[in-house]
């Protein structure tokens, strides 16, 4: 059994001071062991149990963070689900209409007739390849 203790006082932690039981020497075996008395405002906790408790607190903290993230994802999924249900409802309503008119009338502007006074613009150019480029190309073939 571990003889190391951890003293906890009002939310602070400090290592318990070794008593006569912790002192080493030839007279320690013959001396009676005085029980370690904790002050009334503190509790002595074995180190192994203290470390296990801290590990459990860490696990609880991590589980709380995972729960918060899961709730956030659930909220986003519910919002998306509601949006998609509404979208499906709208699409079904469009399909069930007797005529083929869209829900929102589409107005297309009439194309303007071409202006006879405007002449069509054309682009014309002449491409001349330099001789040195032609010679180089013939060599590479």
Image (cartoon, grey):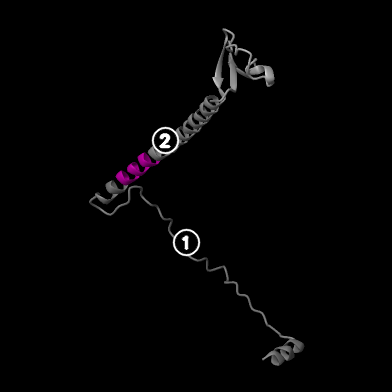
Q: Residues within 10 Å of mark 2 (few under 14, many from 20)?
A: few
- Which residue is drawn at the image coordinates 33% and 41% (left, top)? 86
Q: Is residue 60 visible from the viewing direction of this image?
A: yes
* Between 132 and 14, the one nearer to me in the picture: 14
Say if 29 sits above or below 91 in the image: above
Q: Residues within 10 Å of mark 1 (few under 14, many from 20)?
A: few
Q: Which residues are magenta?
A: 80-90
Q: Is residue 18 visible from the viewing direction of this image?
A: no
Return the disc, 2 or 1, that comes first in the chain's sequence: 2
Q: Position of residue 52 (x, y in %)?
A: 52, 28
Classify residue 118 as left or right of residue 112: right
Say if 53 sits above or below 125 in the image: above
Q: Quadrant of the C terminus?
A: bottom right
- Which residue is drawn at the image coordinates 28% and 48% (left, top)? 92
* Between 58 and 49, the one nearer to me in the picture: 49
Queried whether the magenta region covers residue 77, the answer comes back as no
Residue at the extreme left of the image, as rendered? 98
Residue that carries the numbered disc 1 in the rendered image: 112
* Between 64 and 39, the one nearer to me in the picture: 39
- Which residue is drawn at the image coordinates 44% and 38% (left, top)? 73
The Cα atoms of the two marked residues, 2 and 1, are separated by 52 Å
* Between 74 and 84, the one nearer to me in the picture: 74
Residue at the extreme top of the image, as rendered? 40
Classify residue 132 as left or right of residue 66: right
Q: Position of residue 9 (x, y in %)?
A: 59, 14
Observer-side mark, 2 or 1, equals 2
Q: Position of residue 109 (x, y in %)?
A: 43, 56
Say if 135 sits above or below 70 in the image: below
Q: Secondary structure at mark 1?
A: loop
Q: Secondary structure at mark 2?
A: helix
Say if 99 sits above or below 65 in the image: below
Residue that carries the numbered disc 2 in the rendered image: 75
């Amino acid at each position: 059994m571990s003889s190391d203790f951890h003293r906890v006082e009002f939310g602070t932690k400090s290592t318990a001071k070794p008593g006569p039981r912790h002192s080493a020497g030839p007279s320690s075996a013959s001396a009676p062991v005085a029980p370690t008395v904790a002050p009334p405002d503190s509790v002595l906790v074995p180190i192994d149990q203290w470390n296990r408790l801290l590990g459990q607190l860490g696990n609880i903290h991590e589980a709380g963070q995972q729960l918060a993230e899961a709730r956030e994802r659930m909220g986003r999924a519910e919002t998306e689900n509601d949006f998609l249900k509404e979208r499906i409802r709208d699409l079904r309503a469009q399909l069930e209409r007797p005529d083929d008119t869209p829900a929102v009338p589409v107005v297309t502007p009439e194309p303007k007739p071409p202006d006879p006074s405007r002449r069509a613009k054309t682009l014309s150019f002449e491409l001349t390849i330099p001789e040195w480029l032609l010679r180089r190309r013939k060599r590479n073939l």
